[in-house]
Image (cartoon, grey):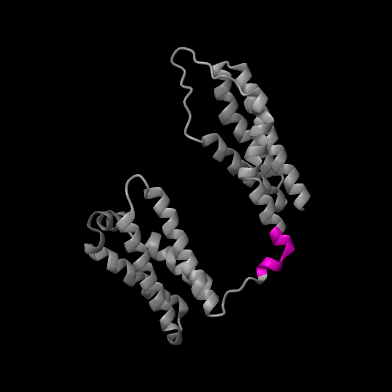
């Protein structure tokens, strides 16, 4: 399938065969960097190799030209502040181009949208991201503790770290259940207990410990219940 072949070429060209030194020079010299054009050439050659069909030369050409246009746009508008956002936007555009090429060449279709089992799994996974976070936040809203500080105790946390930790743990628990590996759920609970509750115990903040415990059990409970309902 062309889609898989081009994705493979993209992953090799963008990550495996592009040293950090090339990235640094491209960001400093932008369109004047020779590595930019070498990088695009590598993508074009890789697409030729993976397609291995001379009649599909136009696909390799479009693949290379589109990669150049996207990379030039990224280098032109990327700043230190929005570098992370541009990375994901850049990768999304590359994947969309590959999907578009595959769709145009009749190698990609949307028949998978008719697979109800797949849609159920995707719906369950989507629910366990931000929607589940909102549900848990609302359920815990009346018990939100006031952080305590004592001595040199460090109470600061990474921005939105708790939200993303919760999303990741729910998705992992959900995956373990879908693939019938319930022992993985036990591993997740144990790992969370060791890393999270030991710190809270040392801090001797009972209310905060209880709050985190309730939130964790709600998070795991939602993931388990969703997994069971989907299966």
In this rendering, the answer to whether 196 lies above or below 110 is above
Residue at the image position 32 percent from the left and 63 percent from the top: 72
Q: In which quarter of the image is residue 186?
A: top right
Q: Residue 41: x, y in percent?
A: 32, 72
Classify 46 as above or below 147.
below
On the image, which quarter does residue 225 sit in? top right
Along the line of sight, which residue is nearer the eye, 77 or 177?
77
* Residue drawn at 60 percent across, 33 percent down: 192
* Residue 146 sits inside the magenta stretch: no
Residue 2 visible to the viewer? no
Looking at the figure, which quarter contains the N terminus?
bottom right
| Residue 138 or residue 18, whichever sits in front | 138
On the question of residue 140 being in view, the answer is yes
Q: Where is residue 92 in the image (x, y as percent from the top left)?
A: 47, 60
Task: Identify the residue at horizontal 78%, vertical 49% (top origin).
Answer: 229
Residue segment shown in magenta:
112-119
The reply, left or right, for residue 150 in relation to residue 117 is left
């Amino acid at each position: 399938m062309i889609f898989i072949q081009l994705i493979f070429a993209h992953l090799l060209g963008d990550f495996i065969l592009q040293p950090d030194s090339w990235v640094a020079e491209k960001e400093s010299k932008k369109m004047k960097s020779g590595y930019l054009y070498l990088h695009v050439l590598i993508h074009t050659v890789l697409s030729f190799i993976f397609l291995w069909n001379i009649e599909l030369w136009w696909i390799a050409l479009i693949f290379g030209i589109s990669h150049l246009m996207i990379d030039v746009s990224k280098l032109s508008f990327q700043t230190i502040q929005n570098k992370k956002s541009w990375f994901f936007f850049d990768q999304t555009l590359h994947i969309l181009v590959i999907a578009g090429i595959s769709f145009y060449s009749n190698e990609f279709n949307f028949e998978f949208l008719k697979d109800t089992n797949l849609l159920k799994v995707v719906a369950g996974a989507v629910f366990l991201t931000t929607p589940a976070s909102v549900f848990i936040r609302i359920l815990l809203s009346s018990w939100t503790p006031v952080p305590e500080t004592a001595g040199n105790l460090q109470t600061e946390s990474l921005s939105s770290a708790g939200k993303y930790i919760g999303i990741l743990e729910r998705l992992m628990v959900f995956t373990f259940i879908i693939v019938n590996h319930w022992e993985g759920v036990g591993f997740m609970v144990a790992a969370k207990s060791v890393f999270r509750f030991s710190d809270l115990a040392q801090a001797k903040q009972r209310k905060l410990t209880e709050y985190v415990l309730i939130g964790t059990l709600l998070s795991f409970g939602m993931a388990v219940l969703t997994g069971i309902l989907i299966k």
